[in-house]
Image (spheres, rainbow, N blue to C red):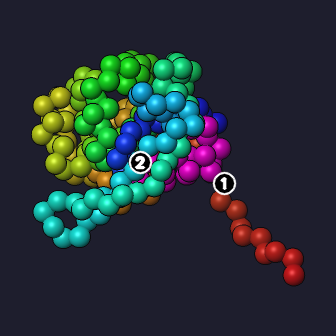
Amino acid sequence: MSDILMIVGDFGEDYEIMVPFQALQMVGHEVDAVCPEKEAGETIKTAVHDFRGDQTYMESRGHNFELNATLAEVTPSDYDALVVPGGRAPEYLRTHEPVLDAVRHFFEADKPVASLCHGPQILAAAGVLDGYEMTSFPAVRAECEAAGCSWVDEVVTDDNLVTGQAWPDHDEWLAQFLDLLGTDISHGEPVAADD
């Protein structure tokens, strides 16, 4: 199975951090969650962004999410893939050069990258989107297009990059990422427990 790096930060989207972190581990991948200026064992605060018919999403406080690795101590070349969740965190994570350097490594090495919602703000800041067909949270579309991509209104895989618009895309977004990783999940018949 793959070793996956996940870059997170305070007020990242709870579902976009917790669900992929746990789902990828559930199928056998190792996932290291890191945040600039924080160490393994420290926590970030997440936020839940909900869609209730307003012009934009509503934000509520999520959970404390414990980091299990330290960005300053990881080497991107040791990882097989990258996950960049959304929420508000990307707007400041993209100002950290070690984050941008890590992102650039995965694109230069043509390794699988999954990004969701506002996560592509980090990819745009890293200058890696030129020529890709991708999606993002619709409010980030102009920023992505300015970075050279062709924006589409659906979950999409283009070469090494899988993108989705927000956490409601999890099933399709994660399925496409698992395909890109080459993850084989066997579906067998359920076995009844002995009475």
Number of callouts in the render? Answer: 2
Q: Is residue 100 above or below residue 43?
A: above
Regarding mark 1 in the picture, which secondary structure is present there?
Answer: loop
Decide if residue 85 is on the left or right side of residue 131. right
| Position of the N terminus by quadrant | top right
Name the residue: 36% across, 58% down: 61
Q: Nearer the viewer, mark 1 or mark 2?
A: 2
* Residue interval drawn in magenta: 14-31
Which residue is denoted by mark 2 in the rendering?
A: 45
- Residue type, label 1: Ser
Q: Is residue 107 visible?
A: no
Between 4 and 73, the residue placed more toward the observer is: 73
Between 44 and 189, the residue placed more toward the observer is: 44
Name the residue: 71% across, 67% down: 189
Q: Residue 40: x percent and y percent?
A: 56, 33
How crowded pointer 2 is (Cα within 10 Å; few <14, some 14-19, many 20+) is rated as some
What label sits on residue 129 in the rendered view?
none
Regarding mark 2 in the picture, which secondary structure is present there?
Answer: strand
Give the Cα distance between marks 1 and 2. 35 Å
- State which tag comes first along the sequence, 1 or 2: 2
